[in-house]
Image (spheres, rainbow, N blue to C red):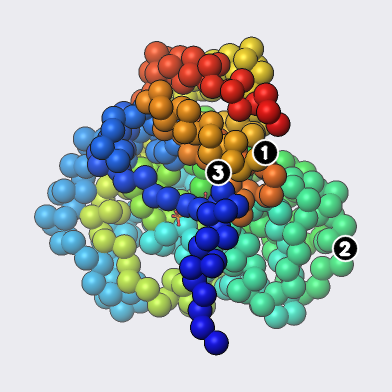
Amino acid sequence: MTFDLSARLAERRAAHLFRQRPLLQSPQGPLVQVDGRELLAFCSNDYLGLASHPEVIRAMQQGAEKWGVGGGASHLVIGHSGPHHELEEALAAFTGRPRALLFSTGYMANLAAVTALVSQGDTVLEDRLNHASLLDAGLLSGARFSRYLHNDAESLGKRLEKAEGNTLVVTDGVFSMDGDLADLPALCAAARRKGAWMMVDDAHGFGPLGATGGGIVEHFGLGIAEVPVLVGTLGKAFGTAGAFVAGSEELIETLIQFARPYIYTTSQPPAVACATLKSLELLHSENWRREHLNRLITRFRQRAAEIDLSLVDSPTPIQPILVGDSERALRLSALLKDRGLLVGAIRPPTVPAGSARLRVTFCALHSDAQLDRLLDALAECWPLVAGDA
Ligand SMILES: *Cc1c(COP(=O)(O)O)cnc(C)c1O
């Protein structure tokens, strides 16, 4: 018995599914240096342009000077420092929930919340297009795990009929690869009718969505009764790193007591929390970032319709162009790169088979002229790959 890794890798290459990491040689921003070339990028999740904001950088520098660099220990030992605590209080106020709990990554926040709330004898129901971390969390929990049709409250309702034990319904708020919004009013109503709890991971909604950046729950006006478990990540529109779960006093205390991905890991560097406190302030107050993003999205969708791009029904900065075949998606991405534009091709297993796409994302720092450069290049390149389906 041996591990035949080379065969596995060769198979992946042959299927046009081999992944490569572009080497970023500059900070995040519309214009980046990648693999030795300057490119105009439309693929970052830094939607509001806060990852390289001078005030956020200064907050992190000052935080490091005051608090040092490392977290030092887990939160329950001696790693829970002033900035972590202050950030949790600020996030609770921002989300309008009694408490919030800080994590080092969104992946861990999701593992923690799901595994602390359900286990053997319980049920977890997830949208089939949920983020991988939510699906992994459902499997790890040991609860009966079932996936309902994408964004379909009726399909969820049928599964709720057969649910046993504590039942957790889990959905992305904004779907990460499609940019569409979860139909939360309908999904929450279905869950509540059966006494199930709703957990929403709004990694891509906080910042761009809602009048003050409060994400999908602010967009739909949903409170803690409808969404008792609310997750946000800090590495996207917040521009920093980490994640949080917001909810009731009891929920947060349960996570502190029982969530293994919370307990058995070192706290994030306190300076990162200092940076996030500043970015939260900017995210909340600087409405021009959301307004400009919305103008970019509207203009992109109008002109995309004129050149017959196949888009998804998305009102968010995530605007995928559906290509279907993985090889053609790679080809379109390469054609754009030849013209100085960086847009990532997203292929299975990240998205369902046959739904490869270019995942275009916008940032509040993109100019109108930069958007036009993308559209002009798409008008030229799209017919070259769309014709030979
Ligand atoms: C990115 C993402 C995560 C993971 O968050 P990280 O902080 O990057 O680990 C979780 N859920 C969704 C929906 C995401 O898009």
List the residue tagged with mark 3.
346
Residue sitting at 63 percent across and 62 percent down? 135
Give residue 115's quadrant in the image. bottom right
Give residue 318's quadrant in the image. top right
Residue sitting at 16 percent across and 55 percent down? 64
Residue sitting at 43 percent across and 16 percent down? 373
The amino acid marked with disc number 2 is Glu
| Residue reaching furthest to the left | 65
User: In which quadrant is the C terminus drawn?
Assistant: top right
Disc 3 element: strand
The amino acid marked with disc number 3 is Ile
Residue 274 versus residue 372: which sits nearer the camera?
372
Q: Residues within 10 Å of mark 1 (few under 14, many from 20)?
A: some
User: In which quadrant is the N terminus drawn?
Assistant: bottom right
List the residue tagged with mark 2.
161
Q: Is residue 91 positioned above or below 319 on the image?
A: below
Count of numbered tags: 3
Residue 324 versus residue 373: which sits nearer the camera?
324
Q: What percent of the width, then of the height, locates residue 288?
A: 40, 22
Q: Earlier in the sequence, mark 1 or mark 3?
A: 1
Disc 2 element: helix
In three-dimensional space, the C-alpha distance between marks 1 and 3, rounded to whole angstroms, equals: 10 Å
Q: What percent of the width, then of the height, locates residue 327?
A: 59, 41
User: Residue 324 has which mark?
Assistant: 1
| Residue reaching furthest to the bottom | 1
Q: Is residue 348 positioned above or below 282 on the image?
A: below
Q: Is residue 286 positioned above or below 345 on the image?
A: above
Disc 1 element: strand
